[in-house]
Structure formats: structure tokens, C-alpha cells
Amino acid sequence: MDRVPVQASILQANQEEATKNRTLFDREGSVAINLMSSPGSGKTSILESTIRLLKGSYRTGVIEGDLQTSLDAERIRALGVPSHQINTGTVCHLDARMVARALEEFPIAGLDLLFIENIGNLICPSSYYLGEHWRVIVCSVVEGADKPKKYPVMFNKADVVILNKMDLIEQSGADLQTLSRNVREVSPRARIFALSCRTGEGMGGWLEWLREVTGRRLSATSAKAGA
Amino acid sequence: MHELSLVMSIIEISEAKAREHRAVSIRTIKVRLGEFTSVAREALAFSFEVARRGTLAEHATLEIEDVPLVVRCAACGSVARPAGDICLLCLDCGLPLRVISGEELQIEYIELD
């Protein structure tokens, strides 16, 4: 019997595909953001209000992931922003191959900012790198302060954590201090923005962060073009 | 439940390696599974039973080595194995801890016939 060393990541094929996606994002000068959360925490609503507030500043596109329906892509399109719907059927996460296929039909040329809205799920999407520059996790304050502790792997990989539905903080009796502390404990380096995309409260910090990462990318791209 | 797609990758990678070595079947596949991944050992084992049918790994055993989460503080060097209520801030100095193991999703080796 022969023992043959393999020493390969189980996610090797996904990683290779993600690297190709990343190369494409970099070539086009698009900042790609993987937006993740549990179902119903407000990912699409955050995108809608972000798009409204950013309108005119950046050319934005959205790839939407859902098991069924193109309702989310239609909501984004209604705002005059190009969007593409991925339907996974029964699959509980987006992987790099699905995004690569979407990119064949959805040209990102000229986009400054590409949001990829993942399937609402705090478990499986964390394993699959899509080629994104940034990982943003949304957690609504009404989901309970212990959420980050229950899903530490997901939160640990976040660059930004948005605490949404701040307009419901009083009615729900949510404990923002404990929630923020729990985010900090599982994801010490993440930026945290507490906001309500419905009322607009707190959106400033999130938009400022988007401007920062998009501006950095834009100046890098124009420097390259000028070189 | 993404363990089925992970198992399909495990089999795909193992079969490619087995074919390189002109093997007729795979007897063992050894993987290292980190504690700090979103992957459940039992679901992985169950998915393997389903996915191996009709492949070179049809009669193979999937050996899973659990790799514990180990973290270290870059500032004070203290090492910990957090469990349950995970906190990735150093208890001694409050700075972020670095994960030094527990994120493995790795195929170590295969045994061939």
C-alpha cells in the first residue's frame, strides 16, 4: 500500500477561482465587498440606502445571491444600479465559481464599487473566499447580543461589522454595549458601525469607510494608468 | 450544510492524485479539520459515505484529525486554547490574539492500492 502526501487545501479549487475573480476586480479597478449576514438583518436595505446616499459619487454594481427569486436584484435595479441575480437553488452559500459565472454575464468594467450580497447564513459562507477585497458582516441589534459569540468563525473574518436596525433599539430592549463588546472579542480588528439604514442614523461612518476604501483604490488605479 | 461540497472537493483532489499514481482505488484519505472552521465533523463523515459511491474512494476510509484552536498574543507571547465562549483578546494585555492553529481544512495524504 502506497502512502502519497497530498498537502492540499480542501478549498483549493475555490481559492484558485477566487484569485481569478480578484485579478479581474483589480484589473477593472473595482472594489469588491462580500456582504454577509443571517437572513433578515437588512443587507439589501442597507445596499438600497447606501446606493441612494452615494448616488453620483461612484459607479456601483451589485451581485445578489439568493436560493430563489430575483426580488433583491430587482430592488437594486429599481434604483438605476446594474445588478445580477445568482440563484443557488438549495446551496447555502456563494462560492467563487458561482461569482465567476456571474461575472461572465455581468460586466464590471467601469464599476468603482461591486457589492456581492451573499446568502443569508452565518455559517457556510465564511468558508468561501470569493475574491473580495473586504468582508462586511451585518448583524441587526434585535438578533441578540450573543450572536457574534455563537458564530465566531464568521465574525472573526470580518473587516467591518454593521450593527443595523438601531431605530429598534429601545423597543427591542437590545443591549448595544454587550453586542459591541462581543463583536470586539471575536473580531478584534473589525471596524464597527452602529446604524439604521431605515432612518439614516449612523450611516455617515459607514459611507466614510466606503469612500476611504474606494478612494484608495481609485487613486491606485489612476496612478497605474498614468504610469 | 456545506460539508457535501467540501467532501466532493476532497474526493476530486484525492482521485486526481490517485490517477497520477495509476492507483486502482483509494484506501484511506487523511484530512485535518480545524476547530475554528464552520465545518462539522459528523456532517463531513456522513457526506463522505454518500459522495464516495462510484469513485476511486468508494471503499476508502476518511480519517479526520481534529485540530484544536490555539491562539497566541503577539505582544506578550501568552498561548491559549479558547473553548466555548471564545474571546480573541488577550486576557493578560487586552491586545488581539493571533490564531496559530484551528483553521485547517487540509488533505494530508492518501493511501492507495
Image (cartoon, rainbow, N blue to C red):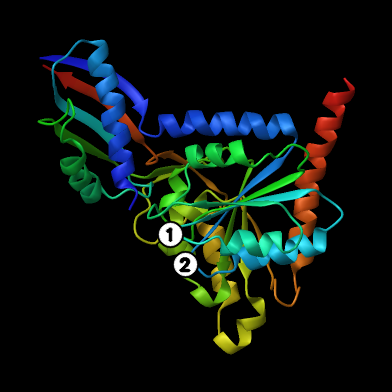
Element marked by disc 2: helix
Secondary element at tag 1: loop
Q: Is residue A24 above or below residue A130?
A: above
Residue at figure coordinates x 62%, y 82% from the top left: A168
Cβ atoms at labels 1 and 2 below 8 Å apart: yes
- Looking at the image, the residue that sits furthest to the right is A226
Residue A37 visible in the snapshot: yes
Q: CA distance from mark 1 to mark 2?
A: 6 Å
Residue name at image x 64 percent, y 41 percent: A133
Q: Chain of mark 1?
A: A
- Dot 2: few (<14), some (14–19), or many (≥20) neighbours within 10 Å? some
Residue A181 in percent (x, y) is at 56, 66
**A216 relative position to B99: left or right:** right
Q: Report which quarter residue A139 is drawn in.
A: bottom right
Relative vertical location of residue A114 with respect to residue A17 in this rendering, above or below? below
Q: Chain of mark 2?
A: A
Residue at x-position 68% and y-position 60%: A76
Q: Quadrant of the C terminus of chain B?
A: top left
Compared across the picture, whether A88 is left or right of B26 comes to: right
Residue B62 position by quadrant: top left
Q: At which x and y percent is residue A204?
A: 79, 64
Image disc number at residue A147: 2
Amino acid under disc 1 = Tyr
Kind of residue indicated by mark 2: Lys
Q: Residues within 10 Å of mark 1 (few under 14, many from 20)?
A: some
Above or below, comparing residue A193 to residue A90 in the picture: below
- In the rendered image, residue A131, in percent from the top left (x then y), is placed at 57, 37
Depth order, front residue of B74/A205: A205
Give me the disc on residue A151. 1
Asked if residue B89 shows in the view, the reply is: no
